Amino acid sequence: MTQEHVVLEKRISWASIFAGVVAVLAISLLLSLLGMALGFSMLDPESATDTPTLKRVTDMK
């Protein structure tokens, strides 16, 4: 009788999982920064009120 050796390959590539996590975190950070930049660009720092107000669309010309 001959014996057969079964070689199990790795089913999970941990390097690709960690790379995916890093990519998701980097994209999330970039999109968060983009959202903050767009939000801050809508504020009017020269307004006369104590609280920051949004610029009107007609004032953005």
Image (cartoon, helix red, strand yellow):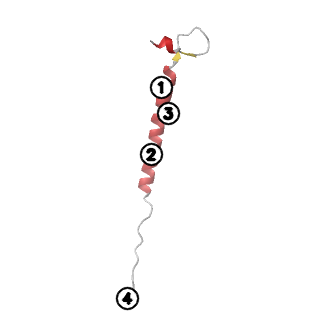
Measured in 3D between alpha carbons, the distance from the residue under mark 1 to the one under mark 4, in whole angstroms, is: 69 Å
Amino acid at dot 2: Val
Residue 11's place in the image compared with 46, above or below, is below
In percent of the image, x 45 and y 39: which residue is there? 27
In percent of the image, x 50 and y 12: which residue is there? 58
Which residue in the protein does label 4 denote? Answer: 2
Measured in 3D between alpha carbons, the distance from the residue under mark 4 to the one under mark 2, in whole angstroms, is: 47 Å
Give the farthest residue toward the front.
58
Residue 10's place in the image compared with 32, above or below, is below
The location of residue 24, given as percent across then percent down, is 46, 44
Q: Of the residues under marks 1 and 4, which one precedes in the sequence?
A: 4
The location of residue 38, given as percent across then percent down, is 48, 25
Residue 35's place in the image compared with 19, above or below, is above
Q: Secondary structure at mark 4?
A: loop
Which residue in the protein does label 3 denote? Answer: 32
Amino acid at dot 4: Thr
In percent of the image, x 47 and y 25: which residue is there? 37
Which residue in the protein does label 1 denote? Answer: 37
Give the farthest residue toward the top.
48
Q: Are marks 1 and 4 in contact (CB under 8 Å)?
A: no
Q: Secondary structure at mark 2?
A: helix
Measured in 3D between alpha carbons, the distance from the residue under mark 2 to the one under mark 1, in whole angstroms, is: 23 Å
Which residue in the protein does label 2 denote? Answer: 22
Measured in 3D between alpha carbons, the distance from the residue under mark 3 to the one under mark 2, in whole angstroms, is: 15 Å
Specify few, some or many for label 4: CA neighbours under 10 Å numbering under 14, 14-19, or 20 or more.
Answer: few
Q: Quadrant of residue 30?
A: top left
